Image (cartoon, helix red, strand yellow):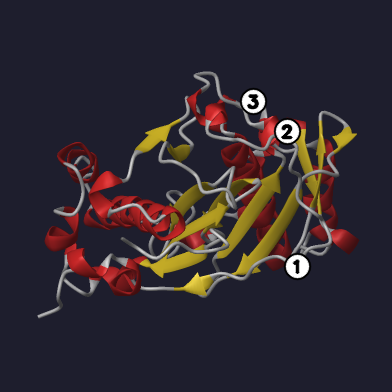
Amino acid sequence: MVKVSESCSFRWVVDVEDEAATGLFEQRLALLPAQEQAIVQSFLQPIDQQRALLSRILQRCCVCAALGVAWEDVALSLTKGRKPFTTNAKPAHAPNFNFNVSHEGRYVALASDPLYLVGVDVSAPRRYRPGGGGAGSGSAARPLGPYLQTFRGQLATSEWALLQRLAPDEELQEAAFQRLWSLKEAFIKARGDGLGFQPLSRAAFRFPRDDPWVTSAHLTLDGVAQSRWCFSLEPLPHGHCVSVAMGPPAEAVDEFGVFRGTLHDRQAAPDPNTPPKAFERVALSDLLPKARCPTVT
């Protein structure tokens, strides 16, 4: 049995290119159930297959480490909004254990928590995104202004105003947009409704002192300040960043009801004064259950 973590709170980030360079894709794919293998292989591009594989393996490693279950006994499911969760039994010290995973650009990240709803989002710089221009996007560089304009309908009035105040400094504008969008994604992923939350402009984020490089943010939802939610941001190499949203389990959105049924302490709420947990750069060889870890040859 895998040793149970007393905290069940993990912050892991994996470099996709480093893992691809190991040449262990096929061996690691074989660690997944057949249905999940098929999902991974349904992606056309090898890099997308790598991201999908890493995402699924991280989830299973997290459940093994947190709950002490064997690899083959990990039970995963999804909310209607595509939030992954486990139906394995929770220990007393982790009554609401849940996790979330995200991938974009070079990184796959996972965050978990024993008590609070958690959502995570990795955000790559524009040059890594389809249509963003630059290396990794497969398209010519696109002016920032028109690019931002395509997202205006999903930004709150206050968020759009911030982007305009930061002009003409495009570096600051792009950093602010990248982080605002990442925070929105982390929030809806923590809740569980995902893209069922519409429009995204309902969630208005602001940075202290309008500084997009800060490591925290505040949320107003439908015009009401959300003091029971905590948000943190952390820079990653190559211009990426990762956002984490943490909130009260009572605010889980779960139309099917199965995920909500795994949350046993609905009164918990994060303390905004608690320092955020830093992400740990890990490799799959560090995480895979020792009995199942492929050997590099």
Q: Residue 283: image x %, image y %?
A: 35, 73
According to the picture, the residue beneath numbered tag 3 turns out to be 198
Q: Residue 21: image x %, image y %?
A: 23, 74
The structure residue drawn at horizontal position 21% and vertical position 49%, both measured from the top left corner, is: 32
Crowdedness near tag 1: few (<14), some (14–19) or many (≥20) residues, C-alpha within 10 Å: few
Mark yes or no: residue 115 visible.
yes
Q: Is residue 197 above or below residue 230?
A: above
Mark yes or no: residue 141 visible.
no
Name the disc covering residue 201, or none.
2
Q: Nearer the viewer, mark 3 or mark 1?
A: 1
Amino acid type, callout 3: Gln
| Mark 3 and mark 2: Cα distance apart in space | 8 Å
Q: Is residue 154 above or below residue 269?
A: above
**Which quadrant, please, contains the N terminus?**
bottom left
Q: Residue 228: image x %, image y %?
A: 81, 43
- Residue at the extreme left of the image, as rendered: 297
Number of callouts: 3
Numbered disc 1: secondary structure: loop
